[in-house]
Image (spheres, rainbow, N blue to C red):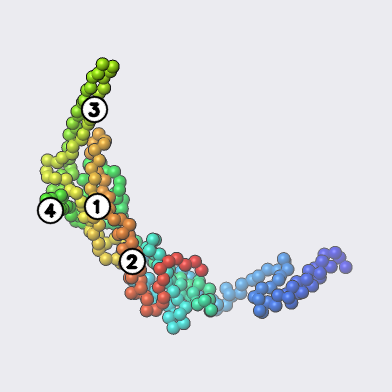
Amino acid sequence: MEKEAIQHLEDNAVIDQINTTLDPETTGVIALPESARLEDLEKYGDQRRRFRGTFATNDPKAFTNYCVTNSDAPDITSACFVDGDQMSALAIMDLGTVHTPLHAEHRAGLSLQKTAAFKALLGIEGERLSQKDAAEWLEDWTPHLSALVSGEGGYEPCAITKAIAAVRRVTLKTKSEQEHADSDYGASRSTMESVEASSREQPLPAFFEFTCTPYQGLTERTFRMRVSLITSAAEPQFRLRMVQAEQEHEEMADEFADLVRQEIGGVMSVTIGRMKA
C-alpha cells in the first residue's frame, strides 16, 4: 500500500475519533478533512431556506410601511435601534430573543436626509464670511430669515431687508492714539489703535433667526444665529454661529427617536443605540 493511502486512512481514523468526542449533534461542530469541500444546495431549490435582504431608504414613511408589513410582533422577533448621532435607524426583522436567537439577516435601514435649507445653514455656521459673501447668503435665504437688533428693552425685531442692507454698508473707522513719556535716561512711546464698525442704514443685527425643516420627516424649527463682526482684517468679515448648537442637535435626535417609537413602537421594540448582530 502506498504511503499516501496509508496517510489517508490514518487521517480518516483520527477524524472519526475526534467527531465521536465532539458529538456534532450536541456541540454543532464537526471535524472535516482538508480536502473536503462544502456545497450550498439552496440555489438549486425552488425557494430559499429563509428570507435575507436589507431595505434602505431616506423616507420615514417608506421605512414605517416596510417595518409594519414585515415585522413579527407576536413572536417578539423584531427590534429597531435608533442612532441619534447619525440620525439613522436600523430595524432587524429576524433578530429573535436571547433564548431563541435568529440569523438577523432581514433588515431595514432609515437614514434621515438633511434638507437643502439646513445644509446651507450648516455650511456657513461658524465660518468667516466676507461682507459680500455674507450679504449674498442672506439674500439667497431671505424667506427663511428674520433679524433682531439690540434695543433698550432687549432685542427687537427688524425688517430682514434693512438688516441685509446694514450688512452690505458696514464701514470701519480706525482711531489711533500715541502716548510719549520722557525721562533723564530715556523715552518711551506707545500706540493704541481702535476700530469702530458702523452702518449707514441702521444698527447692525445682533442675531439672525433661520426657520426651516432640518431633516425630512421632522417638524420645522427656528435656529438662532449670533452675528459677530470681525474687524481685524483689512475688510470687515462676518461670522454666524448657532446658539446652543449641541442642544439643538440633541432635541432633533430626541424628536427622531419619538417619531420612530410613534410609528413602529406598536409592532416592535424601539431602543436608543446601535446594534451589530
Left-right relation of 18 to 103: right
Amino acid found under the numbered disc labelled 1: Met
Q: Quadrant of residue 257?
A: bottom left
Q: Residue furthest bottom?
A: 74
Alpha-carbon span between mark 2 and mark 1: 22 Å
Q: Which residue does the numbered mark 2 point to in the structure image?
A: 254
Q: Which residue does the numbered mark 3 point to in the structure image?
A: 191
- Counting residues from the start of the chain, the first of labels 3 and 2 encountered is 3
Q: Residue at x 23, y 22 (%)?
A: 181
Q: Which residue does the numbered mark 1 point to in the structure image?
A: 225
Alpha-carbon span between mark 3 and mark 2: 54 Å
Dot 3 surroundings within 10 Å: few (below 14), some, or many (20 or more)? few
Q: Residue furthest front?
A: 184
Dot 1 surroundings within 10 Å: few (below 14), some, or many (20 or more)? many
Alpha-carbon span between mark 1 and mark 4: 20 Å
Q: Is residue 120 visible?
A: no
At numbered mark 1, what does the secondary structure look like: helix, strand or loop?
strand
Q: Is residue 255 visible?
A: yes
Q: Which residue does the numbered mark 4 point to in the structure image?
A: 153
Q: Residue at x 81, y 70 (%)?
A: 9
Residue 53 is labelled as none
- Seen in the picture, residue 166 relative to 58 is either above or below; the reply is above
Amino acid found under the numbered disc labelled 3: Thr
Alpha-carbon span between mark 2 and mark 4: 34 Å
- Counting residues from the start of the chain, the first of labels 2 and 1 encountered is 1
Left-right relation of 227 to 157: right
